[in-house]
């Protein structure tokens, strides 16, 4: 594949471009699902194509194609050059790229079991077994179980001299049971909502999730929610765990610290951010125990790779340190806007046919010192919530409201009962400053977000957020019914 890359770079060099690169991507994807005793979905597909970026006269041009031939490489490269020339006629300022060393490297996601070598019949057999357990009780009116596997083989070459080959692999699975009685509908998912748990691993992830072993409990919790009391209203203490805290991190910190959003480049579509540049190094984003770290090297992370799509080597850096806003998600184009000489490596594209844009990296809340039982013991009246059900956050990532699948009422330091329809709301810095307890590393877990949308045209990206159960004081929760 690098012979195609070399042709694009050769042409770009003849036009004395400021910068150019080509990414050839071959993606293999397998989606399987079972719904109510029948196969719901089966997709076993391969795509292949390339995208070419050209920076000329301080402006970008991009073009892509799925026709793999030298002639098409030549045509597409010239098209990207002409688009860059046209763009330069309307530019307000020249694009300036942060420097990055030249790399010649191969990187691959570590895995034990290749999911594409596991027989499809074995995968469907497990999904049907789960489906059978979920639908054993009549209250369950809908059951959906699924698996997804993606292998992305990338070839990346730049006019600066980098040759980078990467093989990225992800696996995911999960299921949902919907219980119905009279006018009441309740849902429980395992191991998390929105498609289940996905990480950069092989089929060993599926085996570790104990999907079949947890199906009965998940089903019975969905049924129990039908008769459970409503979430209480008022300012109560809150413990959040699982993929709900992951989504809280994602929405109120991850998107808020994407530098392109901070600079207003997403404002007309996805919004901007309250975490503006003058706050860097000064603003109390959270309490002094809140430490949020971006890390493109963490094992299993969906944004973990050797290099981003700018050809920047993977890094780990602080976003919030001891409660203070300390960093942003940056790429080579915007790093200098916060006086950094190097990108943090947060530039990624969705496939071969999209231009790379700034994306959330793996972003995790670092562990604290608490045991889980002690976190609960110090609460007089509160709620423990898990598994996201709904979310809403404003265009500046300030005001938010989240709903969860399930909650547990806490009274006088003890978990008392299941509650349904738990909802909480808040203002981002107030919320994170109310954090006064985080469980230790024994409880820390990485959760995958496999469907983050951003950009025009819209692009999907995957990333992970690690956390352990954490406590927030005097949080507004409950809704009037």
Image: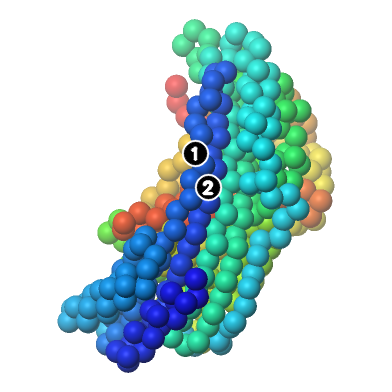
Q: Nearer the viewer, residue 167 or 323?
A: 167
Q: How far is mark 1 from mark 2, CA to CA?
A: 7 Å
Q: Nearer the viewer, residue 397 or 91?
A: 91
Q: Residue at x 53, y 51 (%)?
A: 28
Where's residue 140, x and y in %? 58, 15
Query: Compared to 70, does 237 lie above or below?
Result: above
Q: Nearer the viewer, residue 249 or 160?
A: 160
Badge 1 vs badge 2, beta-carbon distance below 8 Å: yes
Task: From the image, tell me which residue sits under label 2.
Answer: 29
Q: Residue at x 67, y 46 (%)?
A: 117
Specify which label sits upstream in the sequence, 1 or 2. 2
Where's residue 31, x and y in %? 53, 39
For mark 1, does the 10 Å Cα neighbourhood hold few (<14), some (14 to 19), or many (20 or more) residues?
few
Q: Residue at x 68, y 56 (%)?
A: 300
Where's residue 190, x and y in %? 64, 33
Instruction: Identify the mark at residue 79; answer none if there is no mark.
Output: none
Q: Residue at x 38, y 79 (%)?
A: 8
Query: What's the image's color scheme?
Result: rainbow
For mark 2, does the 10 Å Cα neighbourhood hold few (<14), some (14 to 19), or many (20 or more) residues?
some
Task: Please indicate, yes or no, whether residue 119 appears anywhere in the rendered image.
Answer: yes
Task: From the image, tell me which residue sits under label 1.
Answer: 43
Question: Can you tell which quarter of the image residue 7 is in?
Answer: bottom left
């Amino acid at each position: 594949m690098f012979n195609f890359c070399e042709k694009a770079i050769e042409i770009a060099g003849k036009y004395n471009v400021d910068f150019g690169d080509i990414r050839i991507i071959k993606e293999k994807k397998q989606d399987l699902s079972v719904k109510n005793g029948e196969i719901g979905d089966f997709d076993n597909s391969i795509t292949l194509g390339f995208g070419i970026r050209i920076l000329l006269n301080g402006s970008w041009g991009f073009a892509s194609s799925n026709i793999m031939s030298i002639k098409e490489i030549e045509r597409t490269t010239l098209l990207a050059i002409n688009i860059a020339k046209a763009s330069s006629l309307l530019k307000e300022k020249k694009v300036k790229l942060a420097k990055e060393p030249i790399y010649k490297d191969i990187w691959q996601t570590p895995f034990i079991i290749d999911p594409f070598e596991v027989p499809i019949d074995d995968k469907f057999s497990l999904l049907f077994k789960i489906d059978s357990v979920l639908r054993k009780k009549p209250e369950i009116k809908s059951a959906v179980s699924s698996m997804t596997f993606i292998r992305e083989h990338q070839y990346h070459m730049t006019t600066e001299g980098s040759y980078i080959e990467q093989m990225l692999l992800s696996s995911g699975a999960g299921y949902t049971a919907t219980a119905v009685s009279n006018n009441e509908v309740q849902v429980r998912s395992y191991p998390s909502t929105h498609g289940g748990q996905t990480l950069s691993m092989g089929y060993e992830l599926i085996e570790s999730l104990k999907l079949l072993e947890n199906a009965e409990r998940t089903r019975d919790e969905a049924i129990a929610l039908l008769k459970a009391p409503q979430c209480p209203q008022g300012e109560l203490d809150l413990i959040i765990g699982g993929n709900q805290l992951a989504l809280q991190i994602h929405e109120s910190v991850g998107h808020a610290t994407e530098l392109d959003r901070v600079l207003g480049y997403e404002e007309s579509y996805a919004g901007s951010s309250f975490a503006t540049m003058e706050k860097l190094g000064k603003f109390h984003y959270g309490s002094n125990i809140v430490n949020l770290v971006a890390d493109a090297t963490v094992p299993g992370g969906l944004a973990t790779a050797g290099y981003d799509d700018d050809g920047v080597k993977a890094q780990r850096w602080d976003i919030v340190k001891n409660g203070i806003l300390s960093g942003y998600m940056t790429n080579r184009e915007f790093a200098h806007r916060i006086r950094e000489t190097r990108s943090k490596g947060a530039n990624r594209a969705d496939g071969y046919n999209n231009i790379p844009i700034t994306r959330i990296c793996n972003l995790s809340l670092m562990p604290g010192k608490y045991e889980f039982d002690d976190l609960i013991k110090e609460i007089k009246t509160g709620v423990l919530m898990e598994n996201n059900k709904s979310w809403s956050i404003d265009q500046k990532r300030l005001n938010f409201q989240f709903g969860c699948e399930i909650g547990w009422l806490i009274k006088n330091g003890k978990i008392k009962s299941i509650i349904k329809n738990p909802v909480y709301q808040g203002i981002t810095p107030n919320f994170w400053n109310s954090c006064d307890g985080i469980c230790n590393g024994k409880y820390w877990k990485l959760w995958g977000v496999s469907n983050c949308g951003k950009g025009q045209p819209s692009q999907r990206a995957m990333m992970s957020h690690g956390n352990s159960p954490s406590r927030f004081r005097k949080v507004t929760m409950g809704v009037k019914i």
